[in-house]
Amino acid sequence: MPSPNKQLRLIDIIERINKFPDDIFLNIYHDLDSDENISPDSPPIIKMAYAYALHIVVGGLFLQGIFVKDNFHEASSIVNNIQIAPEQKTTQFKKEAAQQTNELLHSYDTRLCNETNSTIIKMARFHAAMNYESVISRVQKVKEKINAKRMNKIDEVPPMTIQNKQLRLIDVIKKVYNQPEGIFANINNDLNESITMDHPPIIKMAYAYARRTAAAGLFLQGVFDREAYEHASRMFKVYQQQTGHTVEFQEEAAQQSNELFSSYDLRLDKEITKFITSMVEHGQTPEQYDGVNYFTYDSIISKVHRAIYKQQ
């Protein structure tokens, strides 16, 4: 326990039992789940830090395949519905709670730093099943991809056709995802699963337009942070340099991207997608990402509609 003059922190009250020495997420979960650690009388900052820690650990266990998606959603709900007075939930309060969470997790494994923990939450929203070491390894790779400026040179290949019709982006995207974060997340994942280096330049450029717009939408929701959006924006610029600079080529690629978005939701027309991307690209909206909460897809579309209406 801390000295009388030191504020109580989450790390001070978690009793280490080490019941599962071979799996750190299970270990932390068991320690957090003890009835002796957290009570209704615990200070608000401890409750918030506990909820954040539980969310991350359950996300890790979901990635390992030990927990199911409903467990992860339940942990998300605990964060969103924790009984703390609204006036106390300031930005500084949330930052301090997150810092205490990271401090606790880092004490179990030094690889569980702030960036790793945030990435675990993002990955848990997009599902995979691995053991603990594989989760950490995968997280490290995701972090490297986000931070690196990389893209192999795209070679020109003959156009692919479907029954004498020129192939379009909408023809190659397999719509398989149904994410709780909504349509932007579905589009982002479907794009990543469907595009290969063998596709012709127009498909790759249309993909880059669509990927940037989907990332902008996810940024507005708070699912992506600024760096995740910037990665998609950098990829877009690389594709522009390597595929074609003509106005006609770029217009056709943008049109194919708009066609794809409208096929997911008729509200995602050219005006909406252009406004969303422009707003994020030019820094006209603050970052909402906190590693835990996010806005619903429909709420963002409504806000964008209202913003466009005000400008008219």
Image: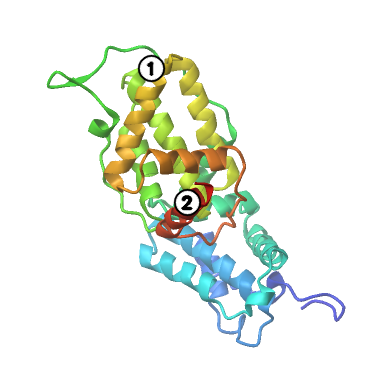
- For residue 124, what is the image quadrant? bottom left
Report the front residue among 35 and 198.
Answer: 198
- For residue 14, what is the image quadrant? bottom right
Left or right: residue 156 versus residue 1 is left
* Label 2 neighbour load within 10 Å: few <14, some 14-19, many 20+: few
Farthest residue, direction right? 5
Q: Can you say whether 121 is above or below 19 in the image?
A: above
Q: Residue at x 65, y 60 (%)?
A: 102
Coloring scheme of the render?
rainbow
- Mark 2: which amino acid? Tyr
Q: Taking the image as drawn, is residue 113 in sight?
A: no
The image shows a total of numbered marks equal to 2
Q: Can you say whether 195 is above or below 175 in the image?
A: above
* Label 1 neighbour load within 10 Å: few <14, some 14-19, many 20+: few
Left or right: residue 23 versus residue 181 is right
Q: Can you say whether 18 is above or below 220 in the image?
A: below
Question: Picture coordinates of residue 208 (x, y %)?
Answer: 42, 30
Question: Helix, strand or loop at disc 1?
Answer: helix
Q: Residue at x 35, y 37 (%)?
A: 191
The residue identified by callout 2 is 309
Left or right: residue 21 versus residue 49 is left
Q: Residue at x 55, y 79 (%)?
A: 34
The residue identified by callout 1 is 248
Left or right: residue 59 versus residue 34 is left
Q: Which of the marked residues, 1 or 2, is nearer the chain's N terminus?
A: 1
- Mark 1: which amino acid? Glu
